Image (cartoon, coloured by chain):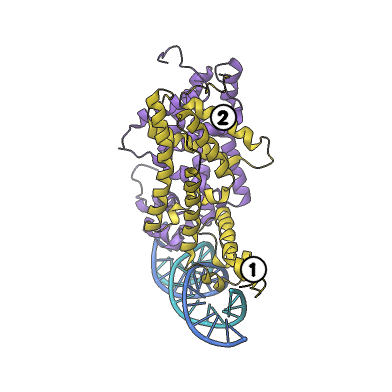
Chain colours: A purple, B yellow, C blue, D cyan
Amino acid sequence: MGSMARKKNSSAEITGPRIREAALRLFARHGYAAVSMRQIAQEVGVQAGALYLYTPDKQSLLFDLMQAHMTALLDALAALPPCDDPLAALEQFTRFHIRFHSARSDAVFISYMELRNLEPENFARIESMRRQYEAHLEGLLARGAMTGQFTVPDTKLAAFAVIAMLTGVNTWYREGGRLSLARVEDIYWDMVRRSVGARMRPDRPDQ
Amino acid sequence: MGSMARKKNSSAEITGPRIREAALRLFARHGYAAVSMRQIAQEVGVQAGALYLYTPDKQSLLFDLMQAHMTALLDALAALPPCDDPLAALEQFTRFHIRFHSARSDAVFISYMELRNLEPENFARIESMRRQYEAHLEGLLARGAMTGQFTVPDTKLAAFAVIAMLTGVNTWYREGGRLSLARVEDIYWDMVRRSVGARMRPDRPDQ
DNA sequence: GTCTATAGCGAGATAGAC
DNA sequence: GTCTATCTCGCTATAGAC
């Protein structure tokens, strides 16, 4: 109980997380089906058999990675400061989406690309979380449409379009490239704002 | 030479295409790495060994599918009637992209998701074709920015954003759903047009 | 908690009969 | 042109020593 009372095997304590990190990176790079448990073990520096002390099987490893990502996404979304004004909320969502996703490109990639490799019940759970996320955006678009701040012919399609546009950043953005992430946020916010037919907010006049 | 002069084995003549169709469907559904040559053979109704009469190996099968898709895309793009006006050209591109891609969802899916499984030289060839397609859009956005018809802070990012938004249609659109494809085109064209800060064309006033 | 060894299986690809 | 049979390899997962 006391500090230093016993010295734990330092590597054993962190093997679990390291397995998940290695699996995340390898699944994102080569695809779930193309990555073997041996490769993951080699990346971590243990033998293949040792992985099964930390995960019941390969499928659970994939599902846990996706679930952790989606849970973190929904938690972070819920932790945003509340925004009554739909335009402010849309800007908040836009910047949040770009920042959150660009910092987790491997997890994002896996969560979109490896849905096919989930067993049905696992698939259903991840899909339900994704629908929650989309519903948040659709809700704020609907509020903005009601107040007349937004012009959207169809809130569901607009939500799909905005999310697809924003998630696309991950396919080309690399740190240290031509544009800073803050600049990318500004540019995309401009396009998102225009795409839903919204004008600038009064406190930041420019249009 | 004369008609009916000899009766060809009817199934032999079409086995090659049927193999590519089966591979396309299976790769799209389960992923390249997860699909076995035996599965493809079973879908076609031949034995696994027979596949190698039509493709040197599994990798070539994947590459041929992607190359055929990208070639068809670039050919169809080049075959569009020329458009001098950037706004008309953008509408043409928007509707073309949605129509072409929604009719080939399996090939689109594969061409975006299985790039990781291409050997380096094959990857480079597909990527170069994709860049040609993006360059077409970026070029017309740049022309519209020069004429003042578009307001785009960055033509490259705008091209990425528009393509991501439009390709996203494939993730949810299903024939016979709530909206017709023509209606989807209209809605997305509206969002694309707004996102680049363009007004309606004079011959179709409404904004 | 990690190792070695291996069971059990299915993969890609080829050889040769028909 | 398609078949059966097979080679060789690598996979997931487990058993049991340490």
Q: Chain of mark 1?
A: B
- Mark 2: which amino acid? Ala
- The image quadrant where one finds the C terminus of chain A is top left
Please report the residue visible at 48 percent of the width from the left and 28 percent of the height from the top.
B87
Circle 2 is placed at which residue position? Answer: A158
- Mark 1: which amino acid? Gly
CA separation in Å, label 1 and label 2:
44 Å
Left-right relation of D17 to B175 = left
**Element marked by disc 2:** helix
Query: Marks 1 and 2: CB-CB under 8 Å?
Result: no
Residue A26 location in percent, x, y? 42, 53
For residue B45, which numbered disc appears in the image? 1
For residue B27, say whether it is visible.
yes
Name the residue furthest front. Answer: B2
Residue B127 or residue A42, whichever sits in front: B127
Vertical relation: A20 (above or below) D16: above
Which is closer to the viewer, label 1 or label 2? Answer: 1
